[in-house]
Amino acid sequence: MSSTASEHPLSVEKRPLWLLGFVMSMVVGLLFYMAASLSIESDASEQFNNLARNTQKSIESRTKSYANLLRGTASLFHANAHVSREQFHRYVANLALQQNYPGVMNLNYSQELDETQRAAFEAAMQHDYPPGRDGYPAFAIHPPAPRAHYSVLVYVEPIASAPDKYGYDIASRPLIAETLAQSRDSGNVSNSGMPVPMHGRPQLTAMAMRLPVYRFGMPVATVEQRRAAYQGSVGIGYDLVSMMRSALADMPVRNVRLTVFDIGPQAPEQPDLPLQLPHNMRPIFDSTTAGMHAPWWQPGSSGRYLSSTMLIEHNGRVWQALFSVRKSDLYSRFDAFLPWLALLIGCASTMLLYMLFHTLASSRRRAIQMATGMTEELRASQIRLQLSHQKLRRLAAHADQIKEEERKRIAREIHDDLGQNLLVLRIDADMLASRTQRRHPRLNARARSTLEQIDATIKSVRQIINDLRPTVLDLGVNAAVEWQVAQFRQRTGIACEVNESHDDICLSDQCATALFRILQESLSNISQHANASRVQVKLEKCRDTVSMSISDNGVGAAIDGRNKLGSFGLVGIEERIKLLGGTFYIESSPGAGMSVHVSVPLGADATAFPYQEESRASS
């Protein structure tokens, strides 16, 4: 009884603590759920806005290509005093409208006439182009009612797209006549703004664009000059539905609804702000099949949809486009389960953290002891790592020094032994060639051939010596830099300039060799990767420091290129400079060339620097 009574208060005391942890975990889980839901919806909205913006740019680029097509066609008439129907037919056929300009149904030309010219022009067209020629029907200006001015379609290519428009006076409608007059006076592209009816083809949403054509060789600087030079206009008819659906087909998300409205000429004030359109306004394009969708404004105000309203500039007019899509069409299966997964993770992680906090609070002293031991172990590991790093750097410096000394020794032995032997052979071969020149022509030719081979071998030996360690290094770093630049210029053909601020710079052998190898590595990188046409090398002495920079005008590279797997050139340069106690940095960006800058003290010693750094690390 006594033991039971003593345990009961403990159980009552613990129960509220675990209940508090459960409540906290549920609250955090709900917060995670809301954050995940909002994040998914925000990402989906941003993704949809980007997709809508890309589609907007695609539609604008298509309309601009149509305008450029008109300008190219107008240039055909500007460059020729007369363009026949056959020439116009060949021009349009070479454009390959279906492949290069999706949605364009035809390209046409209208001739400007007045009432006094109508009869003669109609008779001339009927005489020059009888019915059936090139697939055109009989020419007749229609509507037939007399008018003061006409703008008659005389060329329509391909004619099969709109044979009923042949001979049609597009200026017979007052609104179009006014638009043509404004385009004539301004010289800019005019748009129909609203769909053009196509008799017999009600399924098409045809739109038209026109550009004035002025007579060959006449000035068009002022409005009066443009009116006097005006001879007609070129235009295109394109299917708005085909153009819009081809743009929507490029979107990776399906079931996107696009509704387009023509809101008139572009206003200079507030050009980028969409308008609040009335609900009874009729769109010029709606991607959803009629009778199977809600009104166009409903998706924009529904919580189940994402919508984006954008303006599309259409050669002086503005279209307002409303993109809408169900949120569920943008979510993947993982997105649907992610909020619940976040709820589970939030609850579980909060409960685990609460348990961990409870456990740590009950064993604070042990945690402090463990933290103290881990801190000491980390400090010891850091010191060992620094010492190991310095040993590796010292070993690399020693190996590099041994390699340079071995190169120097091999180069001298080749020069002293092999070079002298080759020189003796050359003298003997030259004497043999001289003595046999008259009496033994065949032997003389053989001796001359041997002499040439010996000369080639001597040249190869000199090249090997220079590759190992150029003897010009013994003359100083200035001479070595000039010699290496001359070799680079001769080998690659790239213009290379050397700028020196001091005649003779006295450096230690290790320092001079390091600067020479850095220059050699940099020029090798330029010849292999930079694709440069000009290189500049600067060697300067400023007080107790020698600096060298190698710049080119090549393709450049990313700054983090030295960390690329298998790339050791820049890493080797950096290590050489660090061993000498100098500085090294790179200035580069893609397409803007690259500059390598190094500087070292005059009294730098590659063998002493690692020991100094190691002593600082140990202290």
Image (cartoon, rainbow, N blue to C red):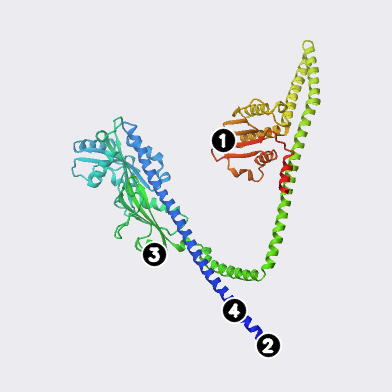
Q: Is residue 460 left or right of residue 56?
A: right
Residue 147: image x %, image y %? 19, 42
Quadrant location of the N terminus?
A: bottom right
Element under disc 4: helix
Q: Residue at x 52, y 66 (%)?
A: 32
Name the amino acid, label 1.
Answer: Gly
Q: Nearer the viewer, mark 4 or mark 3?
A: 4
Residue marked by disc 3: 302
**Amino acid type, mark 3:** Ser
Indicate which label's residue lies in the foreground, 2 or 1. Answer: 2
* Inter-mark Cα distance, 4 to 2: 21 Å
Mark 1 vs 3: CB contact within 8 A: no
Give the residue type at disc 4: Arg
Residue holding disc 2: 2
Closer-to-camera residue (318/133):
318
Name the residue that disc number 1 marks. 554
Q: Earlier in the sequence, mark 2 or mark 1?
A: 2
The image quadrant of residue 222 is top left
Residue type at the position of mark 2: Ser
Residue 157 lies, in percent from the top left, at: 34, 42
The residue lying toward the viewer, choosing from 303 and 369, is 369
Image label count: 4
User: Within 10 Å of the Cα at label 3, are there few (<14), some (14-19), or many (20+) other Cα atoms?
Assistant: few
Instruction: Describe the element under mark 2 as helix, strand or loop.
Output: helix
Between the residue at mark 4 and the residue at mark 3, the CA separation in whole angstroms equals: 47 Å
Per the model, the C-alpha gap separating discs 2 and 1 is 90 Å
Mark 4 and mark 3 lie on one chain; the one further toward the N terminus is 4
Mark 3–mark 2 distance (CA, rounded to whole Å): 67 Å
Label 1 secondary element? loop
Q: Earlier in the sequence, mark 1 or mark 3?
A: 3
